[in-house]
Image (cartoon, coloured by chain):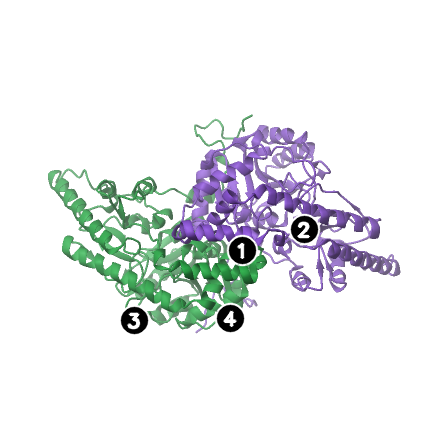
Chain colours: A green, B purple
Amino acid sequence: MTSSTPNSGAINLDPWFGHYAERASGLSASEVRALFAVASRPEVVSLAGGMPFVRALPQDLVSDALDRVMRDSGPTALQYGSGQGVPALREQILEIMALEGISASSDDVVVTTGSQQALDLVAKLFIDPGDVILAEAPSYVGAIGVFRSYQATMVHLETDADGLVPEALAEGIRRIRADGRTIKFLYTIPNFHNPAGVTLSAERRPEIVRICAEAGVLILEDNPYGLLHFDEPVPDALRSLNPDGIIYLGSFSKTLAPGFRVGWALAPHAIREKLVLAAEAAILCPSSFSQLVISQYLATADWKAQINEFRGVYRDRRDAMLDALGEHLPDLSWNVPNGGFYIWVTLPDDLDSKAMLPRAVTELVAYTPGTAFFADGNGRHNMRLSFCYPPPEAIRLGIRRLATVIAGERDLLETFAGTGRLTPNGSGDSVTAPPPDLS
Amino acid sequence: MTSSTPNSGAINLDPWFGHYAERASGLSASEVRALFAVASRPEVVSLAGGMPFVRALPQDLVSDALDRVMRDSGPTALQYGSGQGVPALREQILEIMALEGISASSDDVVVTTGSQQALDLVAKLFIDPGDVILAEAPSYVGAIGVFRSYQATMVHLETDADGLVPEALAEGIRRIRADGRTIKFLYTIPNFHNPAGVTLSAERRPEIVRICAEAGVLILEDNPYGLLHFDEPVPDALRSLNPDGIIYLGSFSKTLAPGFRVGWALAPHAIREKLVLAAEAAILCPSSFSQLVISQYLATADWKAQINEFRGVYRDRRDAMLDALGEHLPDLSWNVPNGGFYIWVTLPDDLDSKAMLPRAVTELVAYTPGTAFFADGNGRHNMRLSFCYPPPEAIRLGIRRLATVIAGERDLLETFAGTGRLTPNGSGDSVTAPPPDLS
């Protein structure tokens, strides 16, 4: 028995081709996906992924929490729970957010399946096809992917070493509205930006918040890395400056472990109820088990000391990467992140990070091409290097290999100088699916 | 600092009122939500929820699986994983589906955050505003909620003691297409239907599949309860009859525990890749931890024997409910389910299950009014009674209380006979948010 479709005359291997929703066209597989599958082989040094180094988390801390949960509240952990999340965990989340100046009610916290789900729910709640979402240039690949999956148009705004440029934000809002387009929110990662590595300065924060409030633009503040600072703590969260105008997203994926898939949204009170309804429609409720384990961990382990451990691990890796870049690739430029997972590298204009990636994988090193972080085809002269997962010696090896790749590419460029064969003049086939972040 | 919006002149407490996507209007809180909050008090016998009785699962089985996971694969469990799900678990899922006649490749299995997320992803992939989704009359409240959240129009089709009526399906497809409307899929629960309790007969299965295949209508087969049969096993899954035309959904929520939030979709190969992309956009990947625990449980525990335990528990509760209904409410009619969690009760025409609910809660018994299971305002003369969660003695007490409530309602009706005061002639304010199912 076979199915027939109204489109069955068309040459397409998918009999359901004509049946998808319009928004499904926004879901496209990354061209580098296949390459990343190769890059996950153990002999490849991957500087591409955003995986935290969970081996730095003592397993006893997790096992203890598991034992306590099963002993004290097994049936609750195994059961459905509130769509909004476990109340005790939502209270503990307030303590975490207080570290960045946020004062809130646990009524306004919604626990999600990683903060990626919060991005999805906010997108679903707010984005009509064609709506504009503002974001830094570059921006998080997974956010670009989900906003596009609701048919948003992303507009990237100038971002420098101090983060999003306020004048660019104000001008962008003016320009887009003058074009008659609707802006639904500003998506921003103020701390240790993914992929740019920069942190929004304390001086700019009230300015960004004021510009958005005056223009009636909602802010979606995504903060998975804020507590992973290597020097000074980050300035207070944007959310602390305007609770009614900002949805704040947090996550346990980088400060504890991503395998539980627990993140949260702190929404303005008016928005929170809709967010809970959207969450219930999507998954009924987040995992009781994961939530109770994390709640137990927060209640009994010294989680602040553990985050400090993580800071040390990632600081050493950042230092290893910076040293190796300085030694082997002095012609490139990069930022010096004071926390988080990423260094954003700028290549000379003649090098194309996307075109170069297959050669890099052949040389057993992987990175994420800058194009992944732009919805508009930009980023060919950038790459994101992650220092979070490989140990320092692997990072040094990876950067040495990268130097070999770049030297080889340069040789080829000189050989073919003037033929234009090696730099496809990219017309926006950017890489927007989330998986690169996990490779 | 306050935010202003273009709509700030309107009288609305939500400053973001004018900013939501159109689809957000499909997210409405159930009117009975507040009542169900009251109904969750311990003195109330709730026959409303769909919570499995997880205390029938020996905690040692779970603790053993947890210990093994932490010992053998802790770092993997704590890390991000594949967006499609853990390969070993996807292989084990094939064994489970083989029990219902399904032969498939693990390449086509996508693990989801409960099968509710699979509903959400399929809806996102297929539903444009105004598209028609076909479903049984009645249908699962959580599916109605998520389809509506993508602005689908639900059309309910006649369903009797043998399940969905094939002639009603064929006629429905003809009628809807004659109206120029687009049907995206048939959503069906063939086994121990929620809420109707009925099972699609073996005779009707090939007929339903044929009608859909000939008409080019995709089938979304939702099967959370199929293994929880009290007598004979259920007939083979629809999916076994037409792999290219059916997305099949399964879940561990009812046969193991919902607290892990692990379900799956088995999609036609052509659809699977898009489903993975949608899943990655929504949550990056399902919980590695939850998946590995379930995989370990399936590998080492006698899970088939455990499902048999569950069958016994639920059979006893069904019997208790049937006995009590026969004893205390002989004037009502109901079906006799051979598995699953639910009995669908039909009230005499003068009784309105929704109007009666506040009185029931006052009498310390709760049920779900039939209106929750219709998108079109029907169901006022029905109620869903769940026998899954309360022990048999509580079920008997609950039905006695329900008899008191109905007797009281009858007395009132006689008092006010002819005034029409007690039966609002319902104009479609149906109850469609998912939470009642969890109360």
Q: Secondary structure at mark 1?
A: helix
Task: Please indicate, yes or no, whether residue B413 appears anywhere in the rendered image.
Answer: yes
The residue type indicated by label 3 comes to: Glu
Q: Nearer the viewer, mark 4 or mark 3?
A: 3
The residue type indicated by label 2 comes to: Cys
Q: How far apart are the alpha carbons under marks 4 and 3?
A: 27 Å
The residue type indicated by label 4 comes to: Ser
Q: Secondary structure at mark 3?
A: loop
The residue type indicated by label 1 comes to: Ala
Q: Nearer the viewer, mark 3 or mark 2?
A: 2
Horizontal and vertical percent for residue B374? 67, 48
Do the residues at discs 1 and 3 belong to one chain? yes
Horizontal and vertical percent for residue A341? 31, 58
**Label 1 vs 3, first from the N-terminus:** 3
Q: Nearer the viewer, mark 2 or mark 4?
A: 2
Q: How far apart are the alpha carbons under marks 1 and 4?
A: 20 Å
Chain under label 1?
A
In the drawing, what numbered circle is on residue A278?
A: 1
Do the residues at discs 3 and 2 belong to one chain? no
Residue with the mark numbered 4: A105
Residue with the mark numbered 2: B388
**Label 4 vs 3, first from the N-terminus:** 4
> Does B403 sit above or below residue B231?
below
Classify residue B267 as left or right of residue B419. Answer: left
**Label 1 vs 4, first from the N-terminus:** 4
Q: Nearer the viewer, residue B205 or A399?
A: A399
Residue with the mark numbered 3: A232
Horizontal and vertical percent for residue A408? 15, 42
